[in-house]
Amino acid sequence: MKPLTRDALLSVAAGMRAPDRHEIFATRFDEDVAALVADLAEGHPVGAVMAAADGTPVAVLGGTEMWPGLWSLWMFATDRWPEVARAATRFAKRELWPALLALGLRRGECRSAAQHTMAHRWIRHLGGVQESIHPAFGKGGETFIGFVIYGETEHVRHPETSQQEQCGQQRQ
């Protein structure tokens, strides 16, 4: 694991795997890797670079606060993803998520291209739930799926938990 730097972001972005490239650039005005990296860096993201055993940056993952409490969660990787997948998963669960909660996350969301099923499995493994389907969301008409992870606090509860609690209270 390494800190997020422009150089590391650029290294991973320049060599990102095809499904990630398609997904990301379907929601941008251009396919300029340098512009993507500049936009990410300007958002002051919280996250890390996952490097292979030889030190090569392979994946970047993190979150960017959109407004107080709402975070955009993101990840992209090169074709060497399998080399860092377990470490990235551990980092996301043990370090990134607690850090985002400490920074006030109430809601973390991401949108993923409908055909990027590998990403969907990973998002669900991390606790994401499908919230919505966005037809014609991409610039080429691609359908995207919206995922969300809620920060459980005394003030915010996952909607399903809240509904279950309300149903239980109504029965009493």
Image (spheres, helix red, strand yellow):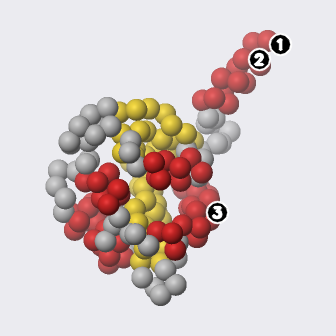
Classed neighbour count for the residue bearing mark 3: other residues with Cα under 10 Å, few (<14), some (14–19), many (≥20): few
Residue to which mark 2 is pinned: 169
Instruction: Judge whether 99 appears above or below 110 on screen.
Output: below
| Closer-to-camera residue (82/149) | 82
Which label belongs to residue 94?
3
Place of residue 36 in the rendered image (x, y in percent of width and height, measured from the top left): 26, 61
3D distance between C-alphas at marks 2 and 3: 34 Å
Q: Nearer the viewer, mark 2 or mark 3?
A: 3
Does residue 106 appear in this view? no
Residue 2 falls left or right of residue 127: left
| Closer-to-camera residue (115/171) | 115
The type of residue carrying mark 3 is Arg
Looking at the rendered image, the quarter that the C terminus falls into is top right
Instruction: Judge whether 59 appears above or below 149 on screen.
Output: below
Asked whether the residues under the numbered discs 1 and 3 touch, taking CB atoms below 8 Å apart as contact, a structural biologist would say no
The type of residue carrying mark 1 is Gln
Residue 27 falls left or right of residue 73: left
- Name the residue rendered at 70%, 24% in the picture: 164
The type of residue carrying mark 2 is Gln
| Closer-to-camera residue (130/107) | 130
Classed neighbour count for the residue bearing mark 1: other residues with Cα under 10 Å, few (<14), some (14–19), many (≥20): few
Dot 2 falls on a residue whose secondary structure is helix
Among the 4 quarters of the image, the one containing residue 6: bottom left
Dot 1 falls on a residue whose secondary structure is loop
Place of residue 76 in the rendered image (x, y in percent of width and height, measured from the top left): 40, 62
- Name the residue rendered at 41%, 39% in the picture: 145
Residue to which mark 1 is pinned: 172
Choose the circle earlier in sequence order: 2 or 3: 3
